[in-house]
Image (spheres, rainbow, N blue to C red):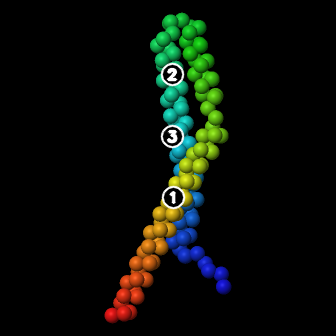
Amino acid sequence: MKRRLGAWWRLGIVLTAFWMVGGTVYFAALQIDELTDTIESSYGFCLSQAPPRASAVASCSDEMTRGFYSIDRGTIWLQALGIAAVLAVLAWMVFGILYGSTLWILAGRKAGKKSE
């Protein structure tokens, strides 16, 4: 006879699926924002150090454009997925330990009441 998953396990699987999508998007957005801030600050530094000529501004703008195009978004998304997956596994481990401990404590209490 096949054992069916209980409602809590099903809820955990659904929440894990949502976490994998949402967590990946969140961590990827954080990394892209951080890289964008770095590129923009280097652009500001370039403008502050360059003489006020059109060619210097164009050079800084070209450098900023190269910086934006050099961001490897595939790697960022893969890293973000990895972070979300590791956190999901850790959460399942913690909840599994809590669930098992709770069952063990409840079984001990039941056995203690029977001996009385």
The image's mark for residue 63 is none
Q: For numbered disc 3, what is the local secondary structure?
A: helix
Image position, residue 109 (x, y; %): 37, 84
According to the picture, the residue beneath numbered tag 2 turns out to be 42
The quadrant of the rendering that contains the N terminus is bottom right
Image position, residue 7 (x, y; %): 53, 74
In the rendered image, the vertical position of residue 49 relative to residue 40, given as above or below: above
Q: CA distance from mark 3 to mark 1?
A: 21 Å
At x 53%, y 38%, the residue is: 31
Of residues 89 and 30, the one nearer the viewer is 89
Q: Amino acid at mark 3?
A: Leu
In the rendered view, does 108 fall on the left or right side of 38? left
Name which of mark 3 and mark 1 comes first in the sequence: 3
Say if mark 2 contacts mark 1, CB within 8 Å: no
According to the picture, the residue beneath numbered tag 1 turns out to be 90
Q: For numbered disc 1, what is the local secondary structure?
A: helix
According to the picture, the residue beneath numbered tag 3 turns out to be 30
